[in-house]
Image: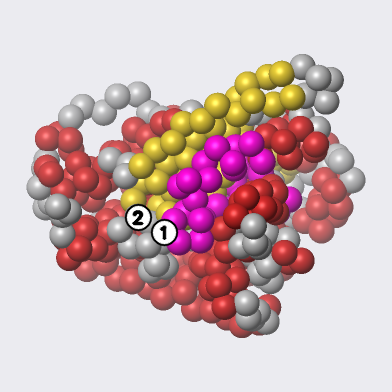
Amino acid sequence: MTDLAAQPRPQSSPLVTAQAQLADAVAILGYDHGLHRMLATPRREMNVAVPLRRDTGEIVLFTGYRVQHNISRGPGKGGLRYSSSVDIDEVRALAMWMTWKCAVVDVPYGGAKGGVTIDPRLYSPAELERVTRRYTSEIMPIIGPERDIMAPDIGTNEQTMAWVMDTYSVNLGYTIPAVTTGKPLTVGGSLGRPTATSRGVVHAAEAALGDAGVRLDEVSVAVQGFGKVGAPAARIFAESGARVVAVSDEHGGVHNPDGLDVSALLRHVHAGGPVHEFPGGAAVDNVALLGLDVDVLVPAAVEGVLDADTARQVKARWVVEAANGPTTPEGDEVLAERGVVVVPDILANAGGVVVSYFEWVQANQAYWWTEHEIAERLEHRMLASYRSVAAVAQAEGISMRDAALTIGVRRVAEAHLIRGLYP
Ligand code: NAD
């Protein structure tokens, strides 16, 4: 145990969770205090003011961040989040998780994350474009295809990535698609990227079920969050034969023990209907959804939803973390005591960064792969990563979270040690 690992854990927050997880991995790996501090501390952080002239002419000011947690194995890689919850500590936590995630699935990136403290639902598309362009121009010095590559996250999308790419390119005088991933196809995006995270979640779930001799078409699933990750995940689970019995968004969810018609629900949501008003099931709130009698629970919304209290209500045998950091350390302990198998975020939701890596490789080579090639390579990478994590968990008698973290943390630490300390 190092000093950091021995410190009492304050109230939970994403950064507290991320630091506690790192401390556990460092304790298992037996690293010293200095190496722990190196791994725990972001390499570079940028904090910028983002002024916006509103459509009305009024000026408002937002704060934006970009954190590069680690760049020892390659350029920083990580999403850009627009949410009123964004603060520097949330971005630090998300950047740290990206570092371990990229290492677990062995893509040649470090970990980074960005965010602007803004509720994007309150602003027009033209205002969001101005916010994105100003934020991008402020952080220009530290981003780029060889420095730090952005992708969508909560509150941002393909359009945001096109604006980031355009702002960066216009400032340098030529088109540089590889500065972002998750772009529209017409400006160098990759086939398969919009559903990659969700597809990876289903591959991870299928592999975990398979270890217990269970097939996807034998299980019921509840998905919390119906956004870019949760909605395609629910659809792919249903297409794979699983019974999707509940889904939700931030306003609440819908539950039908016989299985929801996910295609009809998607049509209802695309037409502007809230999830909980879908007529194919009964309304359920977001806490109750976590405790439903299902086989597989997929948190695909925000951090910290599975704490000690909600974890006690979980009836699922498997929790497959599509969101980043949905389980607090206390929630993790409760789930472990109750024998719930947790497929951790840095493995389960890594499909997005895997196909982002494919998008970056394609953009750098200006040569595009088929959807089939991408789907096949994604599946291979997800299953190989799952197998290596499950093997370490079994050999060491540790959780899959600790196994994934020790693999990721060790790869990053080895990169540090072999590169040496400058000067
Ligand atoms: P999104 O903004 O597209 O969707 C978020 C969804 O969660 C929405 O349906 C929203 O209504 C819902 N939600 C928000 N707060 C909630 C709450 N308190 N309870 C229940 N539902 C709530 O975001 P996304 O890109 O789908 O990201 C979801 C999660 O997945 C985040 O943790 C993100 O970091 C993670 N993630 C995303 C990607 C990606 O490729 N987009 C990749 C890896 C991980």
Residue 71's label in the rendered image is 2
User: In the image, is 40 to the left or to the right of 288?
Assistant: left
How far is disc 2 from disc 1 in space, using C-alphas? Answer: 5 Å
Respond yes or no on whether mark 2 lies under 8 Å from ligand 1. Answer: no
Can residue 86 be seen in the rendering of this structure? no
Mark 1 sits on what residue?
A: 75
**In which quadrant is the N terminus drawn?**
top left
Point out residue 398 in the picture as x, y percentages from the top left corner: 25, 57
Q: Is residue 198 above or below residue 1?
A: below
Can residue 281 be seen in the rendering of this structure? yes
User: In the image, is 194 to the left or to the right of 203?
Assistant: right
Point out residue 223 in the picture as x, y percentages from the top left corner: 62, 49
Q: Is residue 281 above or below residue 285?
A: below
Q: Is residue 78 magenta?
A: no
Residue furthest out toward the right: 271
Q: Amino acid at mark 1?
A: Pro
Local SS, label 1? loop
Residue 43's label in the rendered image is none
- Residue at figure coordinates x 70%, y 49% from the top left: 163
Q: Is residue 246 above or below residue 295?
A: above
Residue furthest out toward the top: 58
**Mark 2 vs 1: CB contact within 8 A:** yes
Point out residue 334 in the picture as x, y percentages from the top left corner: 35, 39
- Residue at figure coordinates x 73%, y 40% from the top left: 129
Point out residue 347 in the picture as x, y percentages from the top left corner: 43, 60
- Residue at figure coordinates x 15%, y 59% from the top left: 420
Residue furthest out toward the front: 173
Q: How many neighbours does mark 2 have within 10 angstroms: few (below 14), some (14-19), or many (20 or more)?
A: many
User: In the image, is 18 to the left or to the right of 77?
Assistant: left
Q: Amino acid at mark 2?
A: Ile
Choose between 388 and 310: the one closer to the eye.
388
The span picked out in magenta is 133-159
